Image (cartoon, rainbow, N blue to C red):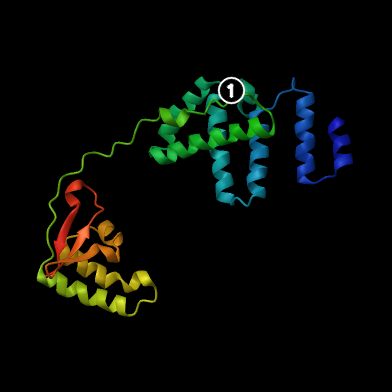
Amino acid sequence: LWLAAVQRETGSSAQSRQFAHIMSRSIDKKAGVTFGEVLKEYKERRKADGAQQKALKNIDRVANIFADECLPNGLKTLQASVTKQQANEFVKIAQQVWPGRKTCADAISLLSTIFNHGMKVLDASEKNPFKYAVSTLPKANRGVRKARSNEAYDNDQLSAMLPSLAKLSSKGRSEATLMVLPVTLLALYTGMRIEEICSLKVSDVRSVDGIDYIAVSKSKSNAGIREIPLN
């Protein structure tokens, strides 16, 4: 009745309904807010923000797996009663459902976002059991990269590459495209890294006793700070 009265006074817009819902919950906190109610309100907010159907289906899938597998009363479980232990239980399940670490972390982060939404918008709970859940995932094993020596281009490779770069630079419309060939030639003749070339200034081209050289003042390592003769 109170909710209907507020809506009569404030109107029937989405903002008015949300305001009335929040106020009614603050007055009757004994009723509590269920995870299902939080999920529904969160989806409505995402839909209003232009979320695509695929994203909304993914929200449903992740939330329902959590509710069905980890919560005693499913979507009817009060958000305030959800524990960190139940969140950790979902993390274990998520690693089986989504073997890839990034996809698994995305699913966990989604639930954390839903709980934050419930806390801030519906006053559903005081704590988020998923706050640090992603950090409990094992680190991705990237393996050890094998050392590989750099090999110089041979004449055939250069003959095939340089004309194409020259054509690209001559027809380029942007400053970056016009610089493709000059930058490539400078790298070939001097052995400079791309970062070193991009940070060059006019003042870095100097001359001593009639010999022009490039002064590299910024490099990846101290050994990279050097002077390169142009002869």
- Name the residue at 23% across, 66% down: 205
The residue carrying pointer 1 sits among few (fewer than 14), some (14 to 19) or many (20 or more) residues within 10 Å by Cα, namely many
Q: Is residue 181 above or below residue 152?
A: below
Looking at the rendered image, the quarter that the C terminus falls into is: bottom left
- Across and down, in percent, residue 105 comes to 44, 37
> Element type at marker 1?
loop
Q: How many marks?
A: 1
- Name the residue at 15% across, 61% down: 228
Q: Is residue 148 above or below residue 68?
A: below
- Across and down, in percent, residue 203 comes to 27, 64
Query: Disc 1 designates what residue?
Result: 82
- Across and down, in percent, residue 28 comes to 78, 23
Q: Quadrant of residue 206?
A: bottom left
- Name the residue at 49% across, 34% down: 108
Instruction: Give left or right: position of 52 versus 192.
Output: right
Instruction: Give left or right: position of 188 versus 175.
Output: left
Q: Amino acid at mark 1?
A: Val
- Name the residue at 28% across, 61% down: 200
- Front residue of 64/137: it is 137
- Across and down, in percent, residue 94 comes to 45, 32
Looking at the rendered image, the quarter that the N terminus falls into is: top right
Q: Is residue 108 above or below residue 170?
A: above
Instruction: Give left or right: position of 87 versus 47.
Output: left
